Image (cartoon, helix red, strand yellow):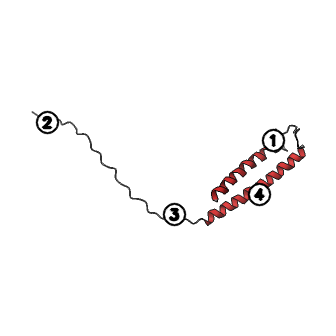
């Protein structure tokens, strides 16, 4: 169930980003989206549609966020990694060194 909510939340987030970027900037900060719409829906109708879509997507985002937080709080863990004692370090296995050639002492 938690994975389903995460996927739904990701889809809501992506849709919200797209809807917010499609809205017309009233301040003209970037100068994007200021052209004539000339489509099926009037400019005012498009603005109202995008505003409503943003509102419902925000409600869906907060609802899924709260549901995920409640699920995480109610999750029962069997233990913590802090409860487990650290494993004792083991010494590395000794490797055989090749024999050094002997130095003749004297004849």
**Residue 25: percent from left, percent from top:** 83, 43
Q: CA distance from mark 3 to mark 4?
A: 34 Å
Label 2 SS: loop
Asked whether 3 or 34 is in front, the reply is 3
**Are the residues tagged 3 and 1 within 8 Å (C-beta)?**
no
The residue that appears at 30% across and 48% down in the rendered structure is 94
Asked whether 24 or 39 is in front, the reply is 39
Q: Earlier in the sequence, mark 4 or mark 1?
A: 1
> Is 27 placed left or right of 94 in the picture?
right
Q: CA distance from mark 1 to mark 2?
A: 89 Å
Q: Nearer the viewer, mark 2 or mark 4?
A: 4
Q: Earlier in the sequence, mark 1 or mark 2?
A: 1
Q: Residues within 10 Å of mark 2 (few under 14, many from 20)?
A: few
> Is 20 placed left or right of 78 in the picture?
right
Quarter-of-image position of residue 31: top right
Q: CA distance from mark 2 to mark 3?
A: 64 Å
**Are the residues tagged 1 and 2 within 8 Å (C-beta)?**
no
Q: Quadrant of the N terminus?
A: bottom right
Q: Which residue is mark 2?
A: 105
Q: Quadrant of the C terminus?
A: top left
Label 4 SS: helix
Q: Earlier in the sequence, mark 2 or mark 3?
A: 3
Which numbered dot is residue 29? 1
Q: Residues within 10 Å of mark 4 (few under 14, many from 20)?
A: few
Q: Which residue is mark 4?
A: 59
């Amino acid at each position: 169930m938690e994975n389903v909510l995460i996927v739904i939340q990701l889809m809501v987030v992506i849709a919200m980003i797209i809807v917010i970027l499609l809205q017309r900037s009233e301040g003209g900060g970037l100068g994007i989206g200021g052209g004539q719409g000339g489509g099926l829906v009037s400019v005012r109708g498009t603005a109202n549609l995008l505003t409503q879509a943003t509102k419902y997507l925000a409600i869906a985002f907060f609802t899924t966020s709260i549901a995920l937080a409640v699920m995480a709080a109610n999750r029962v863990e069997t233990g913590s990694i802090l409860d487990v004692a650290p494993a004792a370090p083991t010494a590395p296995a000794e490797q055989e060194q090749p024999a050094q050639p002997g130095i003749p002492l004297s004849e």
